[in-house]
């Protein structure tokens, strides 16, 4: 009976040690994979999400400013354009 307990205790310690070793190998493999993935992504010349969002916001603001400036330009051109009655007279004299 005593020898059965000793065998079971030894098997238990062996299994615990093996599980610990497997866990260590798993951690090492995950770290190695993560490093390789980061190296591969770094070589692809990708931008980070924060940079993309910042440039996207800048483009949106520039587009809004462009629309506002176009509206101002159209209004100024409309104010500076000669009345329709004078446009025909200018063409006749040319």
Image (tube, helix red, strand yellow):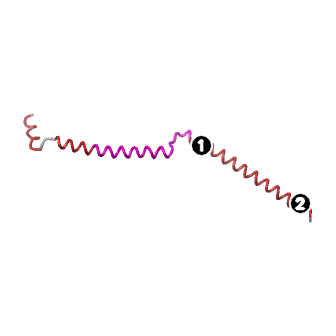
Q: Write the residue at 45% across / 46% down.
A: 53
Q: Write the residue at 58% across / 41% down.
A: 40
Q: Write the residue at 27% across / 43% down.
A: 70
| The stretch drawn in magenta includes residue 75 | no
Q: Quadrant of residue 71?
A: top left
Q: Position of residue 26 (x, y in %)?
A: 70, 50
In the image, 33: left or right of 59? Answer: right
Q: Which residues are magenta?
A: 42-69
Q: Write the residue at 66% across / 46% down.
A: 31
Q: Earlier in the sequence, mark 1 or mark 2?
A: 2
Q: Position of residue 25 (x, y in %)?
A: 72, 49
As displayed, is residue 10 above or below residue 71?
A: below
| The stretch drawn in magenta includes residue 58 | yes
Q: Secondary structure at mark 1?
A: helix
Which quadrant would the C terminus be assigned to in this image? top left
Which residue is tagged 2?
6
Q: Position of residue 46 (x, y in %)?
A: 51, 42
Which quadrant would the N terminus be assigned to in this image? bottom right
Which residue is tagged 1?
38
Q: Nearer the viewer, mark 1 or mark 2?
A: 2
In the image, 48: left or right of 78? Answer: right
Q: 29 and 54: which one is in front?
A: 54
């Amino acid at each position: 009976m005593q020898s059965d307990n000793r065998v079971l205790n030894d098997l238990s310690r062996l299994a615990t040690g093996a599980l610990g070793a497997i866990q260590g190998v798993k951690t090492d493999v995950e770290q190695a994979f993560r490093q390789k993935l980061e190296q591969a992504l770094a070589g692809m010349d990708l931008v980070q999400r924060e940079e993309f969002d910042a440039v996207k916001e800048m483009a949106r603001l520039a587009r809004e400013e462009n629309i506002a400036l176009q509206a101002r330009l159209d209004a100024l051109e409309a104010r500076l354009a000669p009345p329709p009655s004078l446009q025909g007279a200018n063409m006749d004299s040319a």
